[in-house]
Amino acid sequence: MKNFCTVTDYNFHRRVWALNQSLLNGSDDYILYVLALDTESFNLFGQKSWKNQNIRVVSITDLLKQDAALLKCADNLPSYEALNVTSGNIPEAQRIQFIWSLSPYFTWYCLDQYNPEDILYIDADIYFFNNWKRIYDNLDKVSVGLVEHRSPYSPANGKYNVGIVYFKNDIDGYKCCTWWKNCLLFTDNEHFKTHGMCGDQKYLELFEELFDNVEAVDKYFGHLAPWNYQYHSYGGHNIVWQGQQQDLMYCHFSNFKPNFEDNTYIPAQRHGLTKISNPFIKRIYDDYFACLRSVND
């Protein structure tokens, strides 16, 4: 039994359903822990029909009651990237910053409370196109697994993407996850000025420096996102990254905007993608949209 976790509100409930469906396509031997950020999503994911789909829901309200540091964290000043994506709207940027803080926090919480063998954090807008079990084929000696952006290096965003992050529940994995969580709770940490400008993400660069058995695991599988489509080549059902042919394990559908009323979507406007010409990319977006559209509200 493997363990995954994600964070969502009701606005993203279709994406969680699609994520879960894509996981089920590979195997049902897992639990997906969902941190619900509002009453609507908590009630929805707590329904029997959702529980039967390997989902276990946790309420943010309960976590806030249990941990004063997490409650105080909601008042932290927003990072540079949070201000950037909200066009300088400070209250909204503060809300986004708090949500980003919940990715490391909830991952740590799952390790700490449920004591799984390991945990894979997954952003709610990720969809798997291959059997997720293959991710674990090369993790025997890995305590912390990271994936790269696969785009030119940005000092603001860092080398690694927070879309999926793996932690084994051993000494190195637990220490690393706890450290990451604390960096987001307490902005007076010594690395905040150099690595705190992009919410939880740029801190990932320090994992290899500060902890043992940390590895970039995406050399074993392929993944895509709007910021890296142009840096891959495509052939048949495979992608090519730096001369290496890979199956597509997952795609990160960041900033995807569906319109179910007129059966259209905007792929990723914030990332500069409003139309798709590549047939490979078009196919996976159509598949994702079809899965979202099939959700019965």
Image: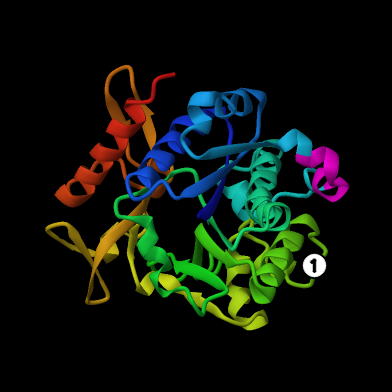
As drawn, is 72 to the left or to the right of 149?
right
Which sits in the foreground, 265 or 118?
A: 118
Examine the structure image and report whether residue 64 is included in the region drawn in magenta: yes
Q: Residue at x 76, y 61 (%)?
A: 182
Q: Residue at x 46, y 35 (%)?
A: 53
For the question of whether residue 205 can be seen, the reply is yes
Disc 1: which residue: 189
Q: Amino acid at mark 1?
A: Asn
On the image, the x and y values in percent for residue 8 come to 57, 38
On the image, the x and y values in percent for residue 231 come to 28, 65
For the question of whether residue 154 can be seen, the reply is no
Q: Residue at x 34, y 60 (%)?
A: 223
Q: Relative to residue 23, is residue 236 depicted above or below?
A: below
On the image, the x and y values in percent for residue 37 come to 65, 34
Q: Residue at x 58, y 33 (%)?
A: 9
Q: Circle 1 — which element?
A: loop
What segment carries the magenta color?
A: 63-72
Instruction: Tell me the quarter of the image containing the C terminus.
Output: top left
On the image, the x and y values in percent for residue 16 come to 47, 37
Most distant residue in the right direction = 68
